[in-house]
Image (cartoon, rainbow, N blue to C red):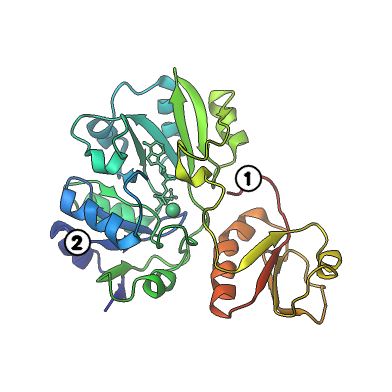
Amino acid sequence: MIEISTDIRKAKLILENNELVAIPTETVYGLAGNCLSETAIKKIFETKKRPFFNPLIVHIHSLHKLDEIAQEIPEKAKLLANAFWPGSLTLVLKKRPNVSDLITAGKETVAVRIPNHQLTLELLENLDFPLAAPSANPFGSISPTTAQHVADYFPEELKLVLDGGTCDNGIESTIIGFENDMPVLYRLGSIPVEEIEAVVGKVKVNNKEENKPNAPGMLSRHYAPNTKTILVDNIIEELKNIKNDKIGVITFQDNIQHHSIKAIEILSKEGNIKQATRNLYEFKLTFRKFNQSSIIVFPFGHTCC
Ligand code: TXA
Ligand code: MG
């Protein structure tokens, strides 16, 4: 039975025993295990039912630890680390030989970040090893943004989720890799590309490669709710085409009325993008629970994944 608690000591004991703990970050909750233990890493993949070709992010608590994980770090990566860490930026760098192939899916590179959440930073400081942690959801489903979401996903499979409240950002970190020292966007996320370009200049945006994605977050089906979800500009117009009367709507507007709409969630009354991203996964998960047959999402901005 999973326990929801803020007990860092308990989390430390479980992790030292090569078992898993769900941890809060400012983006989404992570499913964490000892990065140096093959047993723990295998458990991460088994628990998430995640394919082994999909590599994990290593979480560290200070820049000093970066050299133990990565080598030949490009100058631009150092600039980005200084600008955004602790924070929602993941850097993909050349790995050190001691980083397990299981973590990197056999790649020569490793993804790494310093998360910006006090409880998790405190936990990391108390551990002798970094934490490998993918988002704490079964493979392919929506990432959890509260401890309760994690408990709903893994009621029996996990012993502990560290309760750090609702994640501030609510969507995953932005992932940047390097090709000949040129920054390349691998996954859109919490930090807009424009903010990254303000620090290091032009960032290359890779095309989709369905069969061999640089980062599987770029697959066309990902973070998928079980409920059909469509993105529209005009909700009432769209409803004319949908023969279905159990519609859930996620939107900025609070004045929409239609007999088919059975639930409505407002992303942000003030039109605030940050508040909206914080709420998005939460609302999708709520609708999944209540079995709406369609979700309609009103588009907002272009920085979200
Ligand atoms: O915000 C986040 O990044 C959250 C929190 C928990 O830190 N983590 C997260 O992990 O979203 P995950 O495993 O759900 O997504 C990590 C992404 C995957 O798409 C994976 O393919 C990519 O990072 N990735 C990991 N290592 C990589 C590498 N060496 N090269 C390219 N992509 C990599
Ligand atoms: Mg994920």
Residue 79 visible somewhere in the drawing: no
Q: Secondary structure at mark 1?
A: loop
- Left or right of residue 290: residue 78: left
Q: Position of residue 33 (x, y in %)?
A: 24, 54
- Left or right of residue 266: residue 120: left
Q: Can you identify the residue that label 1 sits on?
A: 303
- Left or right of residue 13: residue 274: right
Q: Secondary structure at mark 2?
A: loop
Reply above or below: 113 against 19. above
Q: Label 1 sits on what residue type? A: Thr
* Identity of the residue drawn at 56% across and 73% down: 288
Residue at mark 2: C-beta within 8 A of ligand 1: no
* Numbered circles on residues, count: 2
* Identity of the residue drawn at 32% across and 33% down: 107
Reply above or below: 240 against 58. below
Q: Which mark is residue 19?
A: 2
Q: Position of residue 116 (x, y in %)?
A: 41, 50
Reply above or below: 255 against 208. below
Quadrant housing residue 256: bottom right
